[in-house]
Image: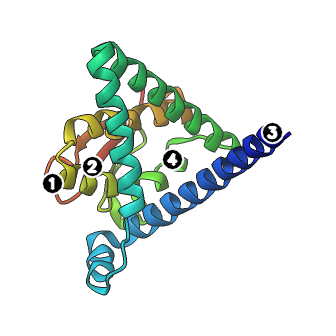
Amino acid sequence: MQNNILELQEKQFGRMHDFHTDRTANIIEAIYEVFGDEAINILDKSGVDFYGLFRWHIERTLSIIDTLKGVYGPTLVDIVLKRESYARNEEGKRIANKLGKNEIDDIIPFFSGGDNENILEINERMTLVKSTGCLIGRIASDINRKEMLYSLHCNCDKDFVEGFNCNLGCEVVQTIMDGHDCCIHRIFMRD
């Protein structure tokens, strides 16, 4: 009986931990997408750890990957990237279903932060959009793990777009992670 109670408590803690982690990540990403480094600098000066928990989870994830890669080799990384690609594709599908529409104009706010000034170019076949807030890019630079985080994050943007609408494609033109002041994505209709 005692083991069942402990097991139940652990499961409940796991659900609450996941809930609060997701909430924190969503709040941090929303603030950063709109205000960028300025908001982080303000909070850093005030002593608030704005993205410490988010960074902690990323570092733990990378530690798990690194440790198991040492045992299983590059196959492990392939498995992780395939799973992340699938998850981002499914996320795109869920969002399109929730919106009840999936045209190119419907996905742009997810890259522009909802700010039309971030749309650099638009025509009936393609939209070039920038984003000035990339928390993952900042963390990747801070922990010197740009290559792996690019694969886990930026490279999966195409999977998100294709899940949203299989007739759309996405090209990552430039990233904050690569040292640019903004990320630029080209979202286009496939031929």
Three-letter amino acid code of the residue under disc 2: Ile
Q: Earlier in the sequence, mark 2 or mark 4?
A: 4
The residue at the far bottom in this view is 46
Which mark is in front, 2 or 1? 1
Three-letter amino acid code of the residue under disc 4: Ile
Which mark is in front, 4 or 3? 3
Quadrant housing the N terminus: top right
Give percent across and percent down for residue 76. Answer: 36, 18
Which mark is in front, 2 or 3? 3
Which mark is in front, 1 or 3? 3
Three-letter amino acid code of the residue under disc 1: His
Relative to 191, residue 88 above or below: below
Give percent across and percent down for residue 132. Answer: 29, 62
Q: Which residue is mark 3?
A: 4
Direction from residue 115 to residue 75 in the image, left or right = left
Q: Secondary structure at mark 1?
A: loop
Which mark is in front, 1 or 4? 1
* Res. 191 in view: no
Q: Which residue is mark 4?
A: 107
Q: Which residue is mark 1?
A: 180
Q: What residue is rendered at 28% in x and 78% in y?
A: 44
Towards the viewer: 101 or 66 = 66
Direction from residue 175 to residue 29 in the image, left or right = right
Q: Earlier in the sequence, mark 1 or mark 3?
A: 3
Distance CA(mark 2)–CA(mark 4): 14 Å
Distance CA(mark 1)–CA(mark 4): 23 Å
Distance CA(mark 4)–CA(mark 3): 45 Å
Q: What residue is rendered at 33% in x and 58% in y?
A: 135
Q: What residue is rendered at 52% in x and 59% in y?
A: 26
Distance CA(mark 2)–CA(mark 3): 51 Å
Q: Which residue is mark 2?
A: 184
Give percent across and percent down for residue 73. Answer: 28, 14
